[in-house]
Amino acid sequence: MTSRSWMGRLGLRYPEAVLAGWGFVLNGAWEFLHTPLYADASREPSYLLWTRLHCTVGDVLILLGAFWVTSLVARSRFWWRSNGTTALPIFLAAGLVYTAFSEWANTRLWEGWGYGPGMPTIFGLGLTPLLQWIVLPPLALRLLARSSAAR
């Protein structure tokens, strides 16, 4: 049995699990790659590892939350297979709205993190976190669809 076949079976039964796995890999890479854009970029490696992993888990939770919201609206957990073009805007909007709120709340209200001088912003929000939501979730969905189609 190949890894694609077990992953395909898992994706057809529990698409959230496969989506979360791809989301963890993609968001983890993104979080580490845009570290230089944050105010804490010069902190010790153990701190950076912990915070980037923490943020990656948060990204996966946002991904799953947007997936489930979309599933409720589409009335199917398999909307990404049959009705992806109609449901995709709902999926992206749900994640983008939460991401924008989270960025605002964590940088302005709770001061959980801050942007470094190199972070491009739009309306005071970091551009790379917003782009992260626009770029990675559709890619994770495509990887989910490919792994499930391989069965």
Image (tube, helix red, strand yellow):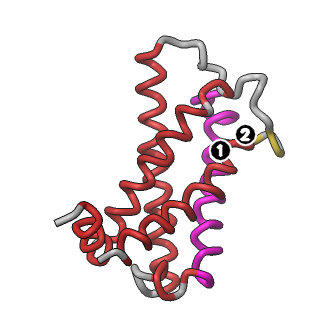
Q: Which of 122 and 80 is in front in this view?
A: 80
Residue 140 sits above or below residue 42 on the image = below
In magenta, the rendered stretch is 85-114
Residue 147 sits above or below residue 38 on the image = below
Residue on which the image places disc 1: 129
Q: Where is residue 90 in the image (x, y as percent from the top left)?
A: 61, 74
Residue at point 54% right, 37% down? Answer: 31
Residue on which the image places disc 2: 126
- Occupied quadrant, residue 122: top right
Helix, strand or loop at disc 2? strand
Q: Do the residues labelled 2 and 1 touch (CB within 8 Å)?
A: yes
In the visual, does 76 lie left or right of 83? Answer: left
Helix, strand or loop at disc 1? helix
Residue at point 44% right, 73% down? Answer: 145
Q: Which amino acid does label 1 sit on?
A: Pro
Report the Cα–Cα distance between label 2 and label 1.
Answer: 6 Å
Q: Which of 78 and 126 is in front in this view?
A: 78
Q: Position of residue 63 (x, y in %)?
A: 48, 59
Q: What residue type is labelled 2?
A: Gly
Q: Does the magenta stretch include residue 20?
A: no
